[in-house]
Image (spheres, helix red, strand yellow):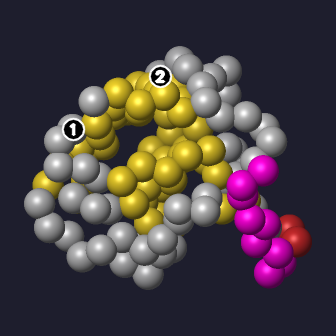
Amino acid sequence: MSRNLHLSCALASAVLLAAAPALAYFVCPEERASPPATESTSFGVTNHSAADIYLYWLDLEGQRRFQATIYAGGYHLQQTSLGHVWVATTIYEDCLATFVGELDHAEYDVF
């Protein structure tokens, strides 16, 4: 299963978290807590952009937990659980895309 995620600098659908201006970043509208672990699954992410992206797992309370750097032009295979939520971000933690652990292995392309 392949998905193309065309990402741009304009994050029109993003919401600004402004609790502390120095720590503010754009969150994905789909960001939410991961459900309790169930069946194991995996997904892959190919970074087609010219910049590194950062992969975070959203824990059971919805907090971002850093997992991996996907270098420009690189690929990352991530083990996860069914229904768990993941976020790909810029170096500034601005949302690029969200991924959810699916029953079948999924492949994502980030541009």
Secondary structure at badge 1 equals: loop
* Residue name at image x 76 percent, y 72 percent: 17
Q: Say if the magenta span includes residue 19.
A: yes
Question: Circle 2 sits on which residue?
Answer: 74
Question: Circle 1 sits on which residue?
Answer: 105
Q: Is residue 68 above or below residue 86?
A: above
Residue 60: x %, y % from top left: 37, 78
Q: Say if the magenta span includes residue 47.
A: no
Q: Which residues are magenta?
A: 12-20
| Extreme-right residue of the structure | 21
* Residue name at image x 36 percent, y 54 percent: 100
Q: Residues within 10 Å of mark 1 (few under 14, many from 20)?
A: some
Mark 1 or mark 2: name the one nearer the start of the chain: 2
Q: How much space separates mark 1 and mark 2, taking CA atoms?
A: 18 Å
* Residue name at image x 48 percent, y 28 percent: 4
Using the rendered view, name the quadrant where residue 26 is placed.
Answer: bottom right
Residue 56: x %, y % from top left: 48, 55
Could you tell me the amino acid type at mark 1?
Answer: His
Residue 82: x %, y % from top left: 21, 59
* Residue name at image x 30 percent, y 74 percent: 35
